[in-house]
């Protein structure tokens, strides 16, 4: 009789699960009342709403100051070239800070992290409003962005904890839409505040502080702990209203998701070498680079090329908002419907790669939008022409985000928060780098050349996703053999 090592048996079992990696379309109903999957639809939608608002504020904070990039350096007697620090610093902090927030949340709970960081973000916004120097303002905005960062990495994991597979695409699209709405809506709101002579740019920071403190109250009242490890004590077999307000590491007060902060922090680094993560990060980092470049450029071109007032310049950001919200129909409702159709054809167990085919349509849309924006701006076409390009790029950005997030959630499930630390850190680092090239590149080369280059970059960015579509299952099987951290995880697992 052949002896089979326990480790080999475990790997074979994981490989078997990876071959059909998905949760059943109609899973068995969980029995634990503290499991977020058992909560009412109203409770789930309320959680999604308040967390979505929290995400929106984080991305809005990064770029809401954009319409004042010409004004603030004058007020503080600094150079115009340094103005991009006001956006670049927050971009970098937003990506890097989750390296710390995710381990803390896995040990002490998502609710605790969201409430505490929202209060701190509000305080940093107050500091920004009272800043007496350019450096002080940059520091305040950068620290505020670090405290706004937790939901970008923890919200996708929250979606996996609260929603079944059949609803994840819609939920992730909602998260992506509010994230994109912050990027596009921030300058829209900021421009009218900055243009008002009785308010000025400082009130941008005051408004952010007011909205953030209000959101803190909403999080305290509406967000119960959503992490779950299937370890609830029998003494808490029922759920009362008090459970919705407890600050605990997991729902129901069971064992924490991560047994220590040190372990939670160190557990992040093995994921840097997973091929699936590397390919997704390469894809979406480049998508974010082109979207960030377009938004920052747009905040300036309608003041320089088309001599709009600051308020009217802000109104142009309705265009990317239209693209962002149109993506809700395409990558929310349609994506889930197509994914479930694949599930029906494969006995209820679809491959995660079946979420990717829609990129065949959204990619060319984004490429066309970049070309339209850059060429029309350079040739000084009618002011509305570049905005059609802005609509298309906004649409491409949200579709790319929601599809990539949903795919990673299907693959990594209980470890999505750890994966998102790498994902968000690297993509924001890329956006941070390009941020400092925007003004010099546009000034020296005009608008056609940069945006043609960006269009080529966006097209090339889709190549890694093509590789995943055709070879994703084989890559996941290989990873499970090579890396313990690449093996299958499920809702309710602790580490």
Image: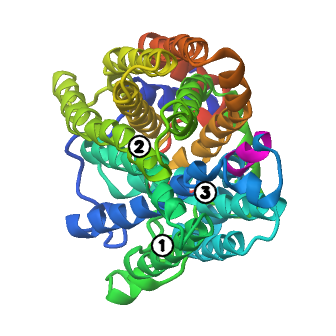
Q: Is residue 181 left or right of residue 322?
A: right
Percent x, y of residue 260: 72, 64
Q: Residue at position x 56%, y 65% from top?
A: 204
Q: Residue at position x 47%, y 63% from top?
A: 54
Q: What residue does disc 1 label?
A: 211
Q: Find numbered disc 2 in the image and state the secondary structure of the residue it sits on.
A: loop
Percent x, y of residue 244: 39, 81
Q: Nearer the viewer, mark 3 or mark 1?
A: 1
Q: CA distance from mark 3 to mark 1?
A: 16 Å
Going from the N terminus, do you reach mark 3 or mark 1 first?
Answer: 3
Image: 87 above or below 201: above
Majority secondary structure of magenta residues: helix
- Residue 490 seen from this side: no
Pick the residue in front: 41 or 21.
41
Going from the N terminus, do you reach mark 2 or mark 1 first?
Answer: 1
Q: CA distance from mark 2 to mark 1?
A: 20 Å
Q: Around disc 3, counting alpha carbons within 10 Å, would you say few (fewer than 14), some (14 to 19), or many (20 or more)?
A: many
Q: Quadrant of the C terminus?
A: bottom right
Corner quadrant of residue 296: top right
Image colouring: rainbow
Magenta segment boundaries in residue numbering: 81-87
Q: What residue does disc 3 label?
A: 149
Q: What residue does disc 2 label?
A: 317
Question: How many labels, in total?
Answer: 3
Going from the N terminus, do you reach mark 2 or mark 3 first?
Answer: 3
């Amino acid at each position: 009789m052949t002896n089979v090592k326990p480790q080999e048996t475990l790997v074979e079992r994981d490989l078997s699960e990876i071959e059909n990696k998905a949760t059943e379309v109609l899973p068995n109903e969980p029995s634990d009342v503290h499991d977020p999957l058992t909560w009412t639809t109203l409770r789930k939608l309320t959680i999604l709403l308040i967390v979505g608002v929290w995400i929106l504020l984080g991305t809005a904070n990064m770029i809401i100051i954009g319409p004042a990039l010409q004004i603030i350096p004058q007020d503080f007697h600094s150079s115009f070239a340094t103005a991009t620090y006001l956006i670049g610093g927050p971009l970098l902090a937003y990506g890097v800070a989750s390296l710390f927030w995710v381990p803390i949340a896995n040990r002490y709970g998502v609710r605790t992290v969201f409430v505490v960081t929202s209060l701190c973000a509000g305080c940093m916004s107050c500091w920004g409003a009272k800043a007496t120097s350019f450096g002080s303002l940059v520091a305040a905005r950068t620290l505020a962005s670090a405290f706004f960062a937790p939901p970008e990495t923890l919200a996708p994991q929250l979606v996996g904890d609260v929603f079944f597979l059949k609803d994840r695409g819609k939920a992730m699209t909602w998260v992506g839409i509010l994230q994109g709405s912050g990027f596009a809506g921030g300058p829209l709101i900021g421009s009218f505040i900055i243009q008002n002579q009785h308010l000025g740019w400082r009130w941008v920071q005051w408004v952010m502080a007011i909205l953030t403190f209000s959101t803190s109250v909403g999080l305290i009242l509406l967000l119960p702990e959503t992490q779950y490890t299937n370890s609830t004590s029998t003494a808490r077999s029922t759920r009362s209203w008090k459970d919705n307000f407890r600050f605990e590491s997991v729902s129901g007060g069971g064992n924490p998701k991560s047994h220590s902060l040190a372990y939670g922090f160190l557990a992040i680094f093995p994921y840097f070498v997973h091929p699936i993560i590397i390919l997704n990060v390469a894809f979406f980092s480049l998508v974010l680079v082109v979207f960030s470049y377009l938004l920052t450029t747009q905040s300036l071109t309608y003041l320089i090329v088309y001599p709009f007032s600051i308020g009217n310049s802000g109104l142009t950001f309705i265009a990317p908002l239209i693209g962002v919200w149109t993506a809700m129909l395409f990558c929310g409702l349609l994506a889930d419907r197509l994914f479930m159709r694949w599930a029906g054809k494969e006995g209820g167990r679809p491959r995660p790669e079946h979420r990717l085919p829609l990129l065949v349509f959204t990619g060319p849309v984004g490429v066309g939008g970049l070309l339209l924006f850059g060429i029309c701006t350079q040739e000084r076409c009618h002011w509305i022409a570049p905005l059609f390009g802005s609509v298309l790029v906004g649409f491409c950005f949200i579709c790319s985000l929601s599809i990539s997030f949903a795919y990673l959630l299907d693959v990594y499930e209980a470890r999505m928060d750890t994966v998102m630390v790498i994902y968000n850190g690297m993509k924001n680092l890329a956006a941070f780098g390009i941020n400092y090239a925007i003004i010099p590149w546009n000034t020296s080369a005009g608008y056609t050349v940069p945006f043609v280059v960006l269009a080529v970059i966006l097209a090339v960015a889709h190549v890694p996703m093509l590789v995943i579509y055709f070879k994703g299952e084989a890559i996941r099987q290989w990873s499970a053999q090579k890396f313990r951290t690449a093996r299958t995880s499920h809702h309710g697992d602790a580490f």
